[in-house]
Amino acid sequence: MKFIENIIRSVMNEAVDKALSRMIKDQYTENLAATIPVGRKVGIPNFIETLMRSSSGTAISRPLGSYIHFSPWEKVLFNPVHLFRMPTPEQIGIQTSVTIGPLAQKPLTLSIPIMIAAMSFGGALSKNAKIALAKASTFVGTATNSGEAGLMREERDAAHLFIGQYNRGGWMNTPDKYKQLDAIEIQLGQGAQGSTSQRTTVKNIGEDFREVFGLQEGEPAVIHSRLQGVNTQEDFIQLVKRLKHETGVPVGLKIAATHHLEKELQIALEAGVDFITLDGAEGGTHGGAPTLQDDLGLPTMFAISRASHFLARKGATGKVSIIAAGGLVTPGCMLKAMAMGADAVYIGTAAMLALIGEQIVKSAPFEAATSLVVYTGKMTSELDVDTASKNLVRYLNSCVTEMEMVAQSLGRTSLSDISKSDLCTTDSEIARATGIQWGFIAPEMQHEAQAEIPFFVPPFDYISDIEQQNNKEI
């Protein structure tokens, strides 16, 4: 064994010596090390994707969404309390439940405000992965989402609370399917791809895929750029009214967050939606063109802030629920999104990573971890459903526990009570855009700061908020 080790060390030493020698002596134009400054100049992802485009000649597909962090959540902080409002005593439990679509005939009540995002069977995930997600959601009392797919019986049976997407492919759009849902999410777009059409080619469609989607053999799965039958604003309004009348469950709208947000929300309110899902530019996807992921949409943070302000102006706060999605990975980000106006959040990429958990060792080091869970993955049969489900349950419990700890330090007794008054920001631009108080200036001086920050959004009445909280006994 020692002899073999010495041979390996000798070979490696000689190879490294030769590589370093060539790197030092070769001219830069002929030097392999030239890839380093080039990579620094254009960025490693752009470097790789340029080579991929030159090879394929078509739009390339990147998994899991953009790597760019559009929403600066790290510049927003919670404000702990000590005396002016007392922290919540440890013997008092923190309420974590939330109701989506409170004015619907059959509102959707969740035990925790974290839901499993829309990730479709076939178009994205394997059957094992979808069943594991559904089982975990049932155990913790939250909802999972079908994604743009048909109704998969095993998923529906495993999910106690199941949100289905009335989608642009048409696969969930018949009464026999959508009447089995606990909430209907009309899907008109997503953060990573906007409203762009998508196609799953026949070679990636198996028999189980065809069965769930109702496809003929040799037929591709096509997601259109617009919902079939919805060609005008009035068409959408009538669709919402019909689905609400037929089912009684909350009917909502999912769109990619956009700078046209208020115009879109106005139509949604006219239609009478029960909830609005906003998928920020950080939203993930099974695979999508990098340009759509990196250069399209509005960051989650600002979409939620603007939507919250808009609903408040329209008197719809507490009537129409906001669900935040897109790039929410940590419990802190999730809770900050709620404090800024979201009633609940969706998680996708984080849920996937948690689902895989320690089973990542099955794929490492020669296969990507996602090969265990994506429909076209090489190792989907290797994913143990029960183990994956337990991994996700532990992750969700951990996230909620940390959120409860924050609530206790804020002197709140419910996660839903946490608001912008519990936040401050270290960034004046964020303060200007969202109305969160600027942490560099005392609360009573915030109005004076307007002169220093052009177009500053007037913050909430901080003194009034203090008085209200002091009068509220815990």
Image: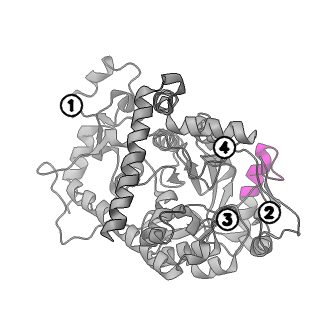
Check disc 2 and give the amino acid type: Lys
Please state which of the two labelled residues, at mark 1 or mark 2, is closer to the viewer: 2
Check disc 3 and give the amino acid type: Thr
Mark 3 burial class by Cα count in 10 Å: few <14, some 14-19, many 20+ = some
In the rendered structure, which disc, 1 or 4, sits on the residue that comes first in sequence? 4
The span from disc 3 to disc 4 (Cα, nearest Å) is 18 Å
The span from disc 1 to disc 3 (Cα, nearest Å) is 57 Å
The span from disc 2 to disc 3 (Cα, nearest Å) is 10 Å
Which residues, given as a range, are shown in magenta?
227-240
Check disc 1 and give the amino acid type: Glu
Q: Which residue is mark 4?
A: 289
Please give left or right for residue 235 compared with residue 192 in the image: right
Q: Secondary structure at mark 3?
A: loop
In the rendered structure, which disc, 3 or 4, sits on the residue that comes first in sequence? 4
- Of the numbered discs in the image, which one, if any, rests on residue 203? 2
Is residue 465 positioned above or below 184 on the image?
above
In the rendered structure, which disc, 1 or 3, sits on the residue that comes first in sequence? 3
The span from disc 1 to disc 4 (Cα, nearest Å) is 47 Å
Q: Secondary structure at mark 1?
A: helix
133 or 370, which is in the foreground?
A: 370
Q: Which residue is mark 1?
A: 444
Residue 315 placement (x, y as % from top left): 51, 45
Count how many numbered circles sit on residues in the image.
4
In the rendered structure, which disc, 2 or 4, sits on the residue that comes first in sequence? 2
